[in-house]
Structures are given as C-alpha cells and as structure tokens.
C-alpha cells in the first residue's frame, strides 16, 4: 500500500465520522442525561410531549375501563350463580308439589277429593217426534 492510499482512506474515515458525529452527540446527551432545554428546544419538544401525554391519558383511561368491566363481570357471575341456585331450588319444589299425593293434600282444604271411580261417558239420547 502506498502512502497516498492510506491518506485517502484516513480522509474517507474522517468524513464518515463527521457524518456520524451528530448521532453520537445525541446518544451521549441521552446517556449523560444532559438535556439543554432552552426556548428553541422547548418549542421543538412540545408536540412530542403533547403526543406522549395523549397516549398516557388513553392508556390510563383504558386501564380504568378494563378494571370497571372486570368488576361488572364478577358481579354478574355471582348474580348468575345465585339465580341458577334459585332456579334449581324452585324447579325441585315444583316437581315435588306436582306429585299426585301432594296435590291431594293441597286440595283437601278446598273440599275436593280424588275420584275413586273412573269417569263415565255420557250419551245424548235424541227424542223422536
């Protein structure tokens, strides 16, 4: 390799470093937490801060909505369990009360008695005139 070629490569490397320097300065500022905020920088930052604030508010609102929905779901599940238990209880009582012996017991105070003889069919006789 010649000296000129080394010099040309060194110049190219220096040019590439100068192009990368602004990014490295930004990274150093971020790493050092060295934020120099003045009026010009603040004006540039305001839209981003508002954007992030809007997302934070949306996130918090979504979290509250989710918690509220979960509470309602738990309440509905408990109510559903109670209603299911009531349904089974009432259904069992109804099937118990519809037994023939229970119906007879409930009808006795009303003066009704079960038939001992099966019902008979009545025939209508036509008068011939």
Image (spheres, rainbow, N blue to C red):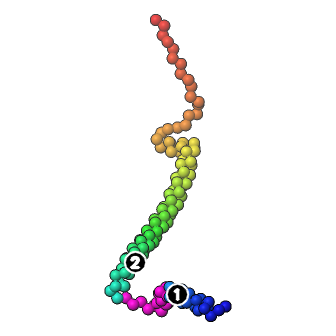
| Residue 35 visible within the image | yes
Magenta span contains residue 15: no
The residue lying at 57 percent from left, 44 percent from top is: 99
Element under disc 1: helix
Q: Residues within 10 Å of mark 2 (few under 14, many from 20)?
A: few
**Which residue is nearer to you in this view: 74 or 89?**
74
Q: Residue at x 39, y 90 (%)?
A: 36
**x 37%, y 81%: residue:** 44
> What residue range appears in magenta?
21-37
Q: Circle 2 — which element?
A: helix
Residue 59: image quadrant is: bottom left
| Residue at the farthest bottom position | 3
Say which label, 2 or 1, has the lower sequence index. Answer: 1
Which quadrant of the structure image shows residue 54?
A: bottom left
Secondary structure character of the magenta stretch overall: helix
Asked whether 67 or 62 is in front, the reply is 62
The residue sitting at 53% across, 48% down in the picture is 94
The image position of residue 71, as x and y in percent, is 46, 68
* Placement of 117 over or under 14, stated as above or below: above
**Residue 47 sits above or below residue 34 on the image:** above
Query: Which numbered dot is residue 122?
Result: none
Counting from the top left corner in percent of width and height, residue 103 is at: 53, 43
In this figure, which residue is indicated by the disc labeled 1? 15
Q: Which mark is residue 48?
A: 2
User: Which callout, 2 or 1, points to the residue nearer the camera?
Assistant: 1
34 part of magenta stretch: yes
Which of 14 and 23 lies nearest the eye of the viewer?
Answer: 14
Residue 78 vs 89, above or below: the answer is: below
């Amino acid at each position: 390799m010649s000296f000129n070629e080394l010099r040309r490569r060194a110049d190219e490397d220096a040019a590439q470093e100068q192009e990368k320097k602004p990014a490295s300065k930004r990274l150093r500022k971020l790493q050092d937490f060295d934020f120099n905020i003045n009026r010009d920088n603040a004006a540039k930052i305001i839209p981003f801060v508002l954007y992030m604030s809007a997302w934070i508010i949306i996130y918090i609102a979504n979290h509250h909505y989710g918690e509220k929905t979960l509470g309602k779901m738990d309440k509905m599940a408990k109510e559903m369990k109670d209603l299911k238990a009531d349904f089974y209880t009432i259904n069992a009582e109804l099937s118990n009360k519809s037994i023939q012996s229970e119906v007879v017991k409930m009808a006795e105070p009303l003066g009704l008695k079960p038939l001992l003889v099966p019902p008979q069919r009545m025939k209508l006789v036509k008068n011939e005139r």
